[in-house]
Amino acid sequence: MARPEAEKVPITEVKEPEPSKEVEGWVEKIEKGEDVKLKKPIRDDYGQLLVKASAPQKPKIVLPLDEEEVKVGRSHPVVDSIRWLAEWCVRIIKLAKGRVFYKN
C-alpha cells in the first residue's frame, strides 16, 4: 500500500493591518495589559460588580529576622544558610524602601 504524499502548504506571515486615515484618530493601539486602567467599576445588567478598578497595592513587608540577626547573619561564612537569609533581607530592604520592617 502506497503512503500518501504530505500536503504542501505555503507558510505566509499575517501582519496586523494599520488603521486607515479615517479612523486613525479614534483607534489607539495598546500593547500591554498593564496600560489598561479602569475609570469606574464594570457592572452587569443586574448591577452586580464584575470588575473593579484596581489600585496599586504597596503592602507592608515584615522580614523573618530582626536587625541584630541580620547583622550577625552577614558575618557568617557564605556556605551558611543564615548568611543567605540575611543577604536576602538586605536586598528586600533596598528594593522596597519605606515598606520593610524587622521582625519584633
Image: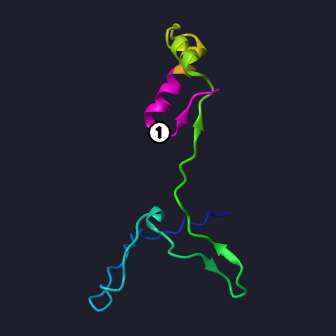
In the displayed structure, would residue 87 be above or below residue 98? Answer: above
What amino acid is at disc 1?
Gly
| Residue 46 at x, y percent in the picture | 73, 86
In the displayed structure, would residue 79 be above or below residue 95? Answer: above
- Quarter of the picture containing the C terminus is top right
Q: Which residue is mark 1?
A: 98
Give, as a single range, the part of the protein colored magenta.
87-104
Question: Would you say residue 91 sits in the magenta stretch?
Answer: yes
104 left or right of 70 in image: right
Residue at the image point whose x is 39% and y is 69% from the top: 13
Is 91 in front, or is 11?
91
21 left or right of 78 in image: left
Question: Would you say residue 80 sits in the magenta stretch?
Answer: no
Is 81 in front, or is 9?
81
| Residue 95 at x, y percent in the picture | 44, 36
- Which residue in the rendered view is the most extreme toward the left? 21
| Residue 64 at x, y percent in the picture | 63, 27
- Which residue in the rendered view is the most extreme toward the front? 104
Residue at the image point whose x is 57% and y is 46% from the top: 59
| Residue 51 at x, y percent in the picture | 63, 72
Residue at the image point whose x is 33% and y is 89% from the top: 23
Type of colouring: rainbow
In the displayed structure, would residue 72 be above or below residue 47? Answer: above
69 left or right of 8 in image: right
Estimate how packed mark 1 is, as few (under 14), some (14 to 19) or many (20 or more) residues with alpha carbons within 10 Å. few
Is 30 in front, or is 48?
48
Label tally: 1
Local SS, label 1: loop
Residue at the image point whose x is 67% and y is 74% from the top: 50
